[in-house]
Image: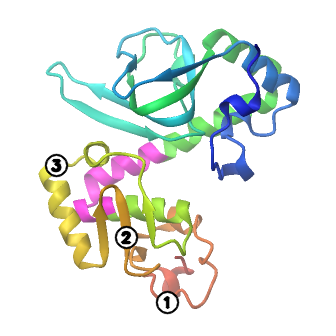
Amino acid sequence: MPLTKSDIWPIGLARNNGVPKIFYNLSEETFQKLLNHSILQNYLQGRLLVQQGDRPQYLYFIADGTVKTLRQDENGREVTLRLLRPGETCMEAVIFMDGDSPIAVQVASDAKLLLIPVEIIRKTVLSDAQFANNLLSIVSYHYKNAMHQIDAMHIKNPAQRLGYYFLLKHLENGHDNLEFTLPFQKSAIANYLGMTPETFSRTLQKLKQQGISFEDNTIKMRDAYVLCNYCDSDAESLCRNSEKDDCFSCPIGKNQGNNG
């Protein structure tokens, strides 16, 4: 039986008015063609989908669960590059490198994934400008995030890195929501932020003194502005309070154009 939208659509997706970036503004014909050539699979936590050095076969769309991309050195030490949630994709750039994958892809929690073959991705890019634009937008978004990650490793201290990460998740969940659950384990977040487990735990204690607690993957905040000290212009663009004069708690607020 052919796949349909209801088979793959993530629950509670908010981006692009509920449309995943990869499918944004696609015609019904293009959307269904992608589905007709794809495979829907369930995977258990820990499953390695792509090994570093493999030739990529699919673009992975996350319908449910979580996935991470990573690199390993010759001693087996790994660094997490991306933490991906429902509605997101991975391998967008790699499949156009025309070579072996420089990254590995692993299931971070039990997941349902749509596997779109490389061949159909390349053909659709040539025949559908909107689909090509969607892929370019996704690659650009992750390039920008990679720049933030590099900056964080070299410029920000651990508290600033973790505070900024929490701020982004806070804004994604709604400015007035003072409690929300992160989809990734502490170890995955620590690795993504370039911290050892010990440094991560110490940093959590520092944030707790500021009114931010993290227990059982749930963030609890004293008020909606407690993370604003970690704001920058990119986070500001995500905040619905950024244009309000009463956003007094933000360090950029009164002096550099408000944020929240």
Circle on res. 37: none
Q: Which residue is mark 1?
A: 248
Do the residues bearing badges 2 and 1 touch, measured as CB atoms within 8 Å? no
Q: Amino acid at mark 2?
A: Lys
Label 2 neighbourhood size at 10 Å, few (<14), some (14-19), many (20+)? some
Q: Position of residue 157 (x, y in %)?
A: 23, 61
Residue that appears at 57% across and 91% down: 246
Which quarter of the figure has residue 59? top right
Mark 3 = which residue? 197
Q: State the mark number for residue 220.
A: 2
Answer above or below: position of 223 versus 246: above
> Residue 39 magenta-drawn?
no
What kind of residue is marked 3?
A: Pro
Front disc: 1 or 3: 3
Mark 3 secondary-structure assignment: helix
**Residue 157 appears in view:** no
**In the visual, does 25 lie left or right of 226?**
right
Q: Which residue occupies the foreground of this view, 158 or 59?
A: 59
Query: Looking at the rendering, which quadrant does residue 141 occupy?
Result: top right
Of residue 238 and residue 220, the one placed in the foreground of this image is 220
Going by the numbered disc 1, the residue's amino acid type is Phe
Tell me where the magenta segment starts and ends, as one range: 145-162
Measured Cα–Cα span from mark 3 to mark 2: 20 Å
Callout 3 crowding tier (Cα within 10 Å): few <14, some 14–19, many ≥20: some
Mark closer to the observer (2, 1): 2
